[in-house]
Image: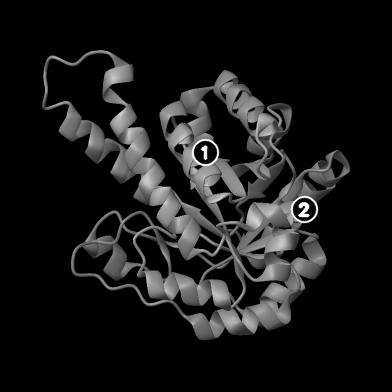
């Protein structure tokens, strides 16, 4: 059952849980996520990044959309980190029900103008829009992580941003980073900032970089108003680690003999995230 993000997260906000948003770049990863969501009776968001879309191509999106539309679960097909109007238009043509336009690296007023333009394009088509304010860190190396400066979302700016853009959801920067944290690095989320943002705006809030963070901090973010959490690295690491182990048997060559172990690994990780975000069983609310 396909819907847009506004419809999906309205329920999550009302009932104080977060819906997991899983980035996928293969159909096997997608199957692992859907197996978990169906097992846990959870709403689910499937995300595809423009780089992933360039690799998988539009026909892949069509297959994913068809599977989501046929599911009994409430589902959203979401463009993650669209970087341009062109990215957004491709997603709209491909049948995405939600898009993100990431203008977080732009000056404040330019970010507002870009998000407002995307809302003008998407909303008449019943497609929801996610914006981002502040910057999410990167974890390509310990040096890069230590040297980076995360720009935390200012609650007052968030209020102005939401009012001027009309976005349906807002990705906030409270100390998470994309990717897996380098060994020895202990992330610390600014849950105090999150509490202030949640008071300042009335739309669902999004947490990017949700992989590899301590469970207790993620759970704390859900309690304080996060309604969507992005997961990419955690499921991809699980998928490829399982495949690497399986491929130690050099006689294997058929995907249907190799990839089920990866599907199972993704399912296990996704099931854990669903329960952590308190999304399990919540499909019955729709």
**In the image, residue 113 lies at what x, y percent?**
75, 56
Q: Identify the secondary structure beneath mark 1.
A: helix
Residue at the (32%, 38%) spot, across then down: 239
Label 2 sits on residue: 7
Quadrant hosting residue 161: bottom right
**What residue is shown with label 1?**
34
Q: Is residue 14 above or below residue 248?
A: below
Mark positioned earlier in the residue sequence (1 or 2): 2
Could you tell me which secondary element the residue under label 2 belongs to? helix
Q: What's the CA distance linking mark 1 and mark 2? A: 20 Å
Q: Residue at x 77, y 43 (%)?
A: 127
Please give left or right for residue 26 compared with residue 12 in the image: left
Tell me: 63 left or right of 239. right
Vertical relation: 21 (above or below) 96: below
x, y percent for residue 238? 30, 44
Residue with the most extreme right position: 124
Residue in front for this viewpoint, 149 or 194? 194
Mark 2 Cα shell of 10 Å, populated few (<14), some (14-19), many (≥20): some
Q: Return the x and y of residue 250 as percentages of the image width and height.
A: 11, 18
Quadrant housing the N terminus: top right
Q: Residues within 10 Å of mark 1 (few under 14, many from 20)?
A: many
């Amino acid at each position: 059952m396909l819907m847009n993000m506004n419809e999906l997260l309205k329920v999550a906000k009302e009932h104080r849980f977060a819906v997991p948003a899983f980035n996928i770049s293969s159909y096997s990863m997608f199957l692992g996520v859907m197996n978990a969501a169906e097992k846990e009776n959870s709403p689910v968001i499937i995300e595809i990044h423009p780089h992933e879309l360039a690799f998988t191509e539009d026909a892949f999106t069509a297959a994913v959309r068809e599977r989501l539309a046929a599911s009994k679960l409430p589902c959203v097909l979401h463009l993650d980190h669209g970087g341009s109007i062109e990215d957004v238009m491709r997603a709209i043509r491909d049948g995405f029900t939600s898009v993100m336009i990431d203008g977080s690296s732009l000056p404040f007023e330019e970010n507002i103008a870009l998000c407002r333009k995307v809302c003008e394009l998407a909303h008449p088509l019943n497609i929801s829009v996610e914006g981002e304010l502040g910057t999410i860190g990167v974890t390509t190396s310990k040096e890069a992580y230590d040297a980076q400066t995360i720009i935390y979302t200012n609650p007052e700016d968030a209020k102005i941003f939401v009012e001027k853009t009309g976005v349906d959801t807002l990705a906030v920067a409270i100390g998470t980073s994309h990717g897996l944290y380098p060994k020895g690095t202990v992330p610390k989320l600014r849950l105090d900032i999150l509490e202030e943002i949640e008071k300042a705006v009335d739309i669902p809030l999004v947490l990017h970089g949700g992989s590899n963070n301590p469970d207790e901090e993620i759970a704390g973010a859900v309690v304080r108003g996060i309604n969507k959490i992005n997961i990419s690295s955690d499921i991809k690491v699980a998928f490829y680690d399982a495949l690497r182990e399986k491929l130690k048997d050099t006689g294997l060559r058929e995907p249907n003999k190799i990839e089920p172990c990866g599907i199972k690994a993704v399912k296990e990780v996704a099931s854990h995230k669903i329960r952590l975000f308190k999304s399990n069983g919540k499909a019955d609310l729709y």
